[in-house]
Amino acid sequence: MTGSLAAWRDLWRSAPCDVQQDTVRLVLMTPAIAYAFALLWTMLPS
């Protein structure tokens, strides 16, 4: 586990700033996207 964590940390640090920002935005928007999908799914006819 520690090796995997270190590898992800190194990958994150080597990523360009815009990629880091896009990743953070996606992580923060994921609950809203999932909620919208679930809402639309329930509106579909059976």
Image: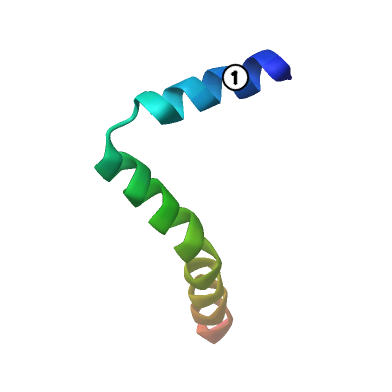
The part of the image, by quadrant, that contains residue 16 is top left
Q: Position of residue 25 (x, y in %)?
A: 40, 58
Q: Does residue 42 sit above or below 25 in this rendering? A: below
Q: Does residue 20 sit above or below 12 in this rendering? A: below
Closer to the camera, 35 or 46?
Answer: 35
The part of the image, by quadrant, that contains residue 19 is top left
Q: Residue furthest top?
A: 3
> The C terminus lies in which quarter of the figure?
bottom right
How many numbered callouts? Answer: 1
Q: Position of residue 17 (x, y in %)?
A: 28, 40
Q: How is the image coloured?
A: rainbow
Closer to the camera, 34 or 43?
Answer: 34
Residue shown at 59%/19% (left/top)? 6
Q: Secondary structure at mark 1?
A: helix
Q: Is residue 15 left or right of residue 45?
A: left
Q: Does residue 26 sit above or below 36 in this rendering? A: above
Residue shown at 49%/76% (left/top)? 36
Residue shown at 53%/25% (left/top)? 8
Q: Is residue 27 left or right of residue 23?
A: right
Q: Amino acid at mark 1?
A: Ala
Residue shown at 66%/13% (left/top)? 3
Q: Local crowd at mark 1 within 10 Å, few (<14), some, or many (≥20)?
A: few
Q: Position of residue 44 (x, y in %)?
A: 51, 81
> The N terminus lies in which quarter of the figure?
top right
Closer to the camera, 40 or 31?
Answer: 31
Q: Position of residue 40 (x, y in %)?
A: 49, 79
Question: Which residue position holds label 1?
Answer: 6
